[in-house]
Structures are given as C-alpha cells and as structure tokens.
Amino acid sequence: MIIRDLAPGDFDAVWRIRRRAFGGPATPGPSWPGDPATFRGFVAESGGEPCGFLRIRRMGQFFGGRVVPMGGLASVAVDPHARGQGVAGGLVAAALEAMRADGQPLSALFTSVPALYRGRGWERSGVVERVELGMTAFRGVPGGKYALRPLTKSTSDELRACYLELACDLDGMLAGHTPNGDPDLGSAVVDSEGKLRGYLALDRRDGELDVHDFVALDQEAAATLLRALGSWAGLVDKVRLRLPEPDVVSMLLPDAGVRMIEPWYLRVVDFPAAVAARGWPAARFLAEGTQTCVEIVDEHAPWQAGTYRLVVRDGTVHCVPIDARPDVRLHARALGPWYSGAVPTTTLRRAGLCTGDASVLDALVTSTTPRMLDSF
C-alpha cells in the first residue's frame, strides 16, 4: 500500500470512495473538491488504484483567547474491499506527520468510530450542542432595547467581527467560521449606536427552524434574538438551536428544551508548539516560576514523546525538553482533554491516562466545556 498526496487526477476516484462510505449523488457538484488552499488530501493506493482518502482542513481554534493552528480531519473513507487491511491507520499516520510538518500542533475530528482514533491519540474534548424547543418555550422572554434588522443588511465583515468577539472567550470555537443558512430568514440585532450585537443564521425545513448560528454578545442581544424566533409561532412547530453558550438561553427561557450533543475529539500533535501557541489566562494568577515536569507517552507521534518542563513566566507558560524525573506522566489521549480543559486530571487518572502529581496542570487550565458552532 502507498500513501501519497492527493492529485487532481484523483478527484473522480476519491469522490466514488467517499460516496461508497458516506452516500451522496453519483457525480459530485461544482464545489467539489473545494479550494485546495483550505485543505491537504492524502490517498491510499493499492495495486495502482486509490482505495482510501483523508482530508486535513486548515483551521484555527481558540484556546485561552488565542488562535491555535489546527488540522481538521475529515472525509476519512476506505473502499469496502480494502477495509481491515490497515488503510485507515496508514492514512492517519501520514496525516499526523503532515500536520506536524505544516505547523498544525492540534488536530480535531468528528467520528462515529472512536476506537480508531482513540487508539492513535485523539480523545473526546468538546461538543457541538443543539437544543430543540417547542414554540411555547419562547413565551415571556424579557424585553430589550436593541433593534432587529434583516441579516442581509449586515456585511460579512460585521458578522465575522461579532462572531470573533464571542468566540475568543470560548475555548474550542473555530476562528474561520462563516455563517450559513438562508440569509433572507436570518436576523441581526444592533444597539442604539447601530453596532451589531448578535445575529441568527438559519434555515426552514418541514415546519421547523434550524438555527445554525445563535450569536449574542450580551443579554439584550440574546433576548431580542429569542423574541425573533418566538415570532414564528403559528408558522413552525419547533426550533432547533445550535448554541455556543446553551446556559445563556436556558437562563432566559422557562423551558430548557431537549439537548442534543455531538462530541468532537482533539489530539495534540506537537506538544511544545501547542503550549507556545495557546493563551494561558490562569497563569497570571500563579507565582512566577511555578513549574512541573511532564512526561508524554506517545507511540504514534514519537517526536513529542519524552519529558518537558512547563514553567510560568510573565503570565504565560514556557515548555522546554528536559532530562529529569517527571512529576506527572500523560498518555497521548490525555493531552487533548487536558489542553482543552474538558476533563480534570483526576478523571484522566481514573481512566488510566495520567499518573503522578498533576496539580500544576490543573491550575494552568480552567475546567470548561469546549464548544464549536461547526461540524466538518
């Protein structure tokens, strides 16, 4: 088996492989395969024919208020006759090396087969969360002073700036997010000075509203957007909201609705680079020189296996390789949940992924539920 970079001559064959795995039309649409500048593809070849495919999307993800380069693994597909022969494993191994070489110290993915990726260092580290609500849930939403206007009157730059103002405070959010849905159905809210304070991007399907983006920078914006959704009573039966902060909505509505959670998995590909790229707000509250020695066990990314000293200096964290006895040992699968803040080290210890004194690691990362507004 040969693993190589995707070439233009592979596009038709790769589409057929993806279609066999995931379904879809017999022929691709005009957007396939997308802008080559936004991804890197790999093909597995056996007997001179493509039998597997993987795509690495070039992304950035907020952690600690800073954007960390991230490779989003997607479209991992293997022909039925080639399954069980290590094709997917070979593609993932090539992707790990490529992401390191391309300066992507993190990798995230969505999967229905967690065992494949857990065995290679990815672990559940965040969620995309949706809430389904009947129309009666929107009764009694408190009033607000903001004005509502069509989404089409907002420029893409305004929408992006509004999204980024929210996203930079929420670990896990993607930096390159683009609103989608029917622009004629979307709404925006502006304050008394005409500044955009939030927006809805949505579609209408079969008596339901499917809200892809619910972005609100404050309570007034959230209330105004919820009232806009409530105005659809009598026209639709329910609303499905994809939310960056579900608790904000639940605090404004009497009905919490039905929550639906889709997990995503994170892997640290290059530990020193990931530490250098992340923001560390909690480090500002630690004593100068606070440190710990961390040993990483990682058979699939051997370039980062070894011991490192993490040191707090000037309100941030510095990482240097060191030959010393470690205070704490982390399995590769533990790195994503710790780095994202999704899981405390006490949980990682009980899962067999962490040993030793991890108190400094816990002090460096604020426990949270990392979220995205995107699936890829």
Image (cartoon, rainbow, N blue to C red):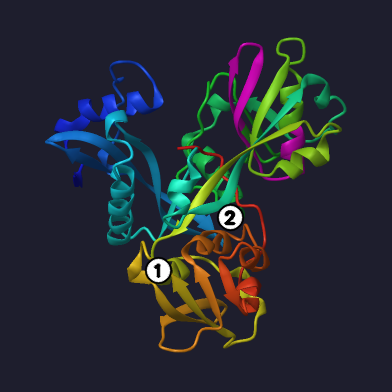
Query: What segment carries the magenta color?
Result: 200-224
Residue type beneath disc 2: Asp
Residue type beneath disc 1: Ala
Q: Considering depth in this image, is 1 or 175 the residue closer to the camera?
A: 1
Please report the residue visible at 43 percent of the width from the left and 47 percent of the height from the top.
116
Circle 1: element type: helix
Please report the residue visible at 29 percent of the width from the left and 42 percent of the height from the top.
85
99 versus 362 height, above or below: above
For label 1, the residue is 273
Residue 214, position as x, y percentages in the image: 64, 35
Cα separation between marks 2 and 1:
18 Å
Mark sitting earlier along the chain (2/1) = 2
Q: Is residue 89 left or right of residue 342?
A: left
Residue 148, position as x, y percentages in the image: 69, 28
**Neighbourhood count class around disc 2 (C-alpha, 10 Å): few under 14, some 14–19, many 20 upward:** many
Looking at the image, the residue that sits furthest to the left is 48
**Neighbourhood count class around disc 1 (C-alpha, 10 Å): few under 14, some 14–19, many 20 upward:** some
Looking at the image, the residue that sits furthest to the front is 84
Instruction: Using the image, tell me which numbered label, if any, was put on residue 366.
Output: none
Main secondary structure found in the magenta portion:
strand
Circle 2: element type: loop
Instruction: Using the image, tell me which numbered label, if any, was put on residue 171.
Output: 2
Find out whether the residues at labels 2 and 1 contact each other: C-beta distance under 8 Å: no
